[in-house]
Amino acid sequence: MIKIQDIEVKSVMTKSNLPVADFSVNPYVGCTHACKYCYASFMKRFTNHSEPWGEFIDVKYWPEIKNAKKYAGKEAFFGSVTDCYQPYEAKYKRTRTLLEQLQGSGISVSIATKSDLVLRDLDLIKTFPHARVSWSINTLDESFRREMDRGVSIERRLEAMRQFYKAGVETTCFISPIFPGITDVEAIIRKAKDCCNLVWMENLNLRGDYKGKILAWIHEYHPELDTLYHDIYTKKDRSYWMELDMQMRAFCEAEGLPYVRNDDSVRSRHGQPPVVVNYFFHEEIVNRVNERGWSNGDCYFLSKKRNTDPGSSCRTSLGLRLPMYNT
Ligand code: SF4
């Protein structure tokens, strides 16, 4: 039984310290997609929820946005610590309400989801400048997907991606998190490459209280991977990611797909092959960000240091549009 409550907030537009996304937007607290690996589950601590992650949502109500034009030229990232299109959005429509309040303001929107409910708002979303929508897909195996999240099926995510792409909206296939020894990255790219402008690849990061849960799950269902996970997540051996990086570089070359690391500046137009971006090496980026004087608060998940406002950080590096580094 999901515990639902309404809450009033002063504003849903949270200023962000992120390099490009000026605002992060989370019309709900909590997320009933309940992914086992959810980075955002730390939100429980900030909101005094004792229920397990995925078993509660707070529905936010905010004063109607007046003078939305003040956001012209800015960018909002939808869904840094929730999924704005989780199933309850069908009933409460808080994401749609916000889009309606911002429509015509000149703000651009970037939306991350594991749902096809976003199709309901396609006509609205495509009126925003530089709108882009990403779907997280880390497997084509529905039984593994069901073990890990309560989002819609992979086929439904892909179909939503196709429809947005067909409508001229920029789409991203977000292969995240990549589970070593389980996620077949090449198969996912083959499936999505005709309906996305970008492919982002992000490795599974394990920290916080979900680390133990994921490792226990691997031990129960994939004991043959215990050693690999121990090497990666206890001994901090990076060779798996380095080998996958080389493998993906070769794959992309063979498939005619541009391949870059840690670079969000390259774009492909509709009809061109998507750009594949490797974000395996988060710590590298953090170090460089720090060297260049970005504050640790720019990204909770990259820096491991919490931002003062949890809603202004993103659940993954990839929603953040990191500073551009070619390696
Ligand atoms: S990873 Fe995203 S979709 Fe999954 S529970 Fe967390 S916020 Fe929701």
Image: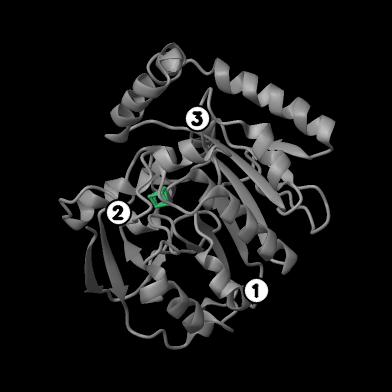
Which label number is shown at residue 308? Answer: 2
Identify whether 240 is placed above or below 22: above
236, 147: nearer the viewer: 147
Identify whether 256 is placed above or below 162: above
Which label number is shown at residue 56? Answer: none
- Disc 1 marks which amino acid? Lys
Q: Which residue is mark 1?
A: 126
In the picture, the quarter occupied by the N terminus is bottom left
Q: CA distance from mark 1 to mark 2?
A: 33 Å
- Which mark is in front, 2 or 3? 3
Q: Secondary structure at mark 2?
A: loop
Q: Which residue is mark 3?
A: 179
278, 147: nearer the viewer: 147
Q: Earlier in the sequence, mark 3 or mark 1?
A: 1
Question: In the picture provided, is 169 more to the left or to the right than 254?
Answer: left
Is residue 290 in view from this perspective?
A: no
Q: CA distance from mark 3 to mark 1?
A: 33 Å
